[in-house]
Image: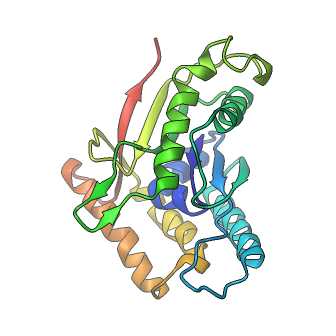
Amino acid sequence: MAIYAHPDDADVAAGGLLAQWASEGCAVHLVVVCDGAKGSHVPQVDVASLREIRRAELQQAADLLGATSVHCLEHVDGGVTNDEELRSTLVGLIREHRPDVVLGPDPTATFFGGVYVNHRDHRETGWALLDAVAPAAAMPLYFPDKGEPHQVRQLLLSGTHEPDVVIDVSRTIDIKVKAVLAHSSQMAGDPEGIRDVVLGRAEQAGRPVGVAFGEAFRSVELDF
């Protein structure tokens, strides 16, 4: 299960791995917290139209990855809070689908190279998924109306300053590129330029372990 803030986040962070798992017969469930309706630098954009565009782009990308299900929680962009309501929803989805692995953003990563501040929605989503997985989903007295408890075995956190796992996604890198490009409303550059950025980042991630293209994560083992 991949839990991310915005419609394009899972594809950018882990599209190669998700596509690989889906091709191997795994059930891949996407959870998108925000509706993406503020994802534009154009002040005159129609918010309702952008929301629908981003939902359609999300479904197209999910189909490319081979996702089993897509859950859109429809929170307002910029308004995500790690509160009881969000944690309850995430616990319910985890208990419903019972994933072995949950992927999402590392909420401890705030500043990147002096040029980027991690989006608040990413950080709040990351904290909420951590709290939902450890320990709430596995403990029967947390949200007892949300189904039978389920222990997630592993967390894979992307966008991290402390990666300790790199997964070879060379076989599915082309699918990742297509999934990212499906979010055309978010593409500031030409498709070839975006493709070059995606490939360049995957090459950089794979270089330390000697693979052509990789995706890096911080891994937390919870199987006890």
- Quarter occupied by residue 202: bottom left
Q: Is residue 211 visible?
A: yes
In-image side of 157 versus 47 (left or right): left
Q: Disc count in the image? A: 0
Q: Is residue 27 left or right of residue 134?
A: right
Q: Quadrant of residue 45?
A: bottom right
Residue 138 coordinates in the image, percent (x, y):
60, 17
Examine the rendering and report whether any part of residue 102 can be seen. no
| Image position, residue 79 (x, y; %) | 60, 55
Question: Nearest the camera: 204 or 33?
Answer: 33
- Estimate the x, y position of residue 25 in percent, counting from the top left: 63, 41
- How are the residues colored? rainbow
109 up-or-down from 175: above or below: above
Where does the N terminus fall, quadrant-wise? top right
The answer to whether 75 is drawn above or below residue 98 in the figure is: below
Residue drawn at 65 percent across, 32 percent down: 84
> Which residue is drawn at the image coordinates 70% and 26% (left, top)?
95
Residue at 41%, 43% (x, y): give it.
Answer: 107
